[in-house]
Amino acid sequence: MRIIRDYQFVEDQDRGATAAIGNFDGVHLGHRSVIDLARNAAPNAPLGVVTFEPHPREYFAPSSTPFRLMGSEARASQLEKLGVQRLYELGFNTALASLTPQEFARDVLRDGLGLSHVVVGADFCFGKGRAGKAQDLVDFGAALGFGVTIAPLMAQGSQTVSSTAIRQALSVGKPGEAAAMLGHWHRIEGPVIGGEQRGRELGFPTANMSIDGLHPPAFGVYAVLVDVLEGSFKGSYHGAASLGVRPMFGENKANLETYLFDFKGDLYGTPLSVALVERLRGEEKFDGLEALITQMDADCQRARTILAAL
């Protein structure tokens, strides 16, 4: 997959694509349906996705509570797995935000990226002040010479599949409901960072990861699937993870601490992908280390049982 970050400098080989447009946070089933429509709209054209970095919501409200389901690297990895050949990851800045809907359609989509066909969700908005709607893009496309398909919103029961609904499911500790909308387990990805090594002292050495910039799922202990993405330990493992601020030790910065079952090795600096499968319990403060270790033993046994049944 080729990644293009500036619509004003696009090589000829990257023009002529049919592309889905959106933020694609989480790359959920609704996003996949939009991408599939783009794939089928022009099977002989390169399959592309147009997205933005940073997310426009981050640009307009940089001090807001973290909300993203995944970072840009994880998003690119998921899109590549879906067969996307051109990722137009456009820098969202003052100049781009200032374009009118017509200017965005003309200057970015036609003249800049040279797209032959675009697919957007029915709730798509674009241009300065989000003034442009999906039907406006259909009209602009007809005038400017590129095709436009509007994808219907996807629903499960009475609920529309959306990044917002997925965040809500994760916030109440229901990763299974989130996974049903995502089409895959919700994953937290990043390098293993240094910690206090308290887990090692307790007999449960953990791989610690930051969740900075990401939407925080409900704090607590989870059964997890772990992919070690690089290095001599590359592979898939089962485990249990604690997500939160470690109240037992007076911490206040949330992170993810993952204990890989039946694993011995040094993972510092290694990128991991940790899938939240089931929340076992909420975050607790125990009376002493013995009570904590007893609970951790029980958590790991329950996690083993859950993961063995997958």
Image: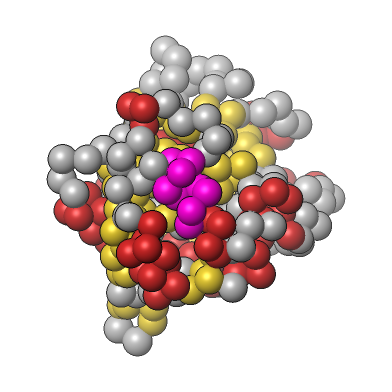
Give 216 or 257, whichever is nearer the viewer. Answer: 216
Span highlighted in magenta in the image: 105-113
Q: Is residue 108 magenta?
A: yes
Q: Residue furthest bottom?
A: 158
Q: Could you say which is closer to the camera, residue 159 or residue 115?
A: 115
Q: Is residue 35 above or below residue 160?
A: above
Q: Is residue 38 visible?
A: yes
Q: Position of residue 103 (x, y in %)?
A: 56, 57
What residue is shown at x 32% (from left), y 55% (from top)? 146
Identify the residue at horizontal 35%, vertical 87% (top origin). Answer: 158
The residue depicted at 36 percent of the width and 31 percent of the height is 14
Q: Residue at x 29, y 65 (%)?
A: 149
In this rendering, position of residue 201 left or right of residue 131: right
In the image, residue 201 above or below residue 225: above
Q: Quadrant of residue 286?
A: bottom right
Q: Is residue 271 above or below residue 79?
A: above
Magenta region, mostly helix, strand or loop? helix
Q: Quadrant of the N terminus?
A: top left
Q: Position of residue 272 (x, y in %)?
A: 49, 32
In the displayed structure image, the side of residue 61 where residue 230 appears, left or right: left
The x, y position of residue 309, in whole percent, is: 25, 53
Above or below: residue 275 compared with residue 31: above
Residue 223 visible in this rendered orientation of the protein: no
Q: Position of residue 230 (x, y in %)?
A: 44, 20
Q: Residue 266 appears in which quarter of the rendering?
A: top right
Left or right position of 146 against 7 = left
Q: Residue furthest top?
A: 232
Q: Nearer the viewer, residue 96 or 47?
A: 96
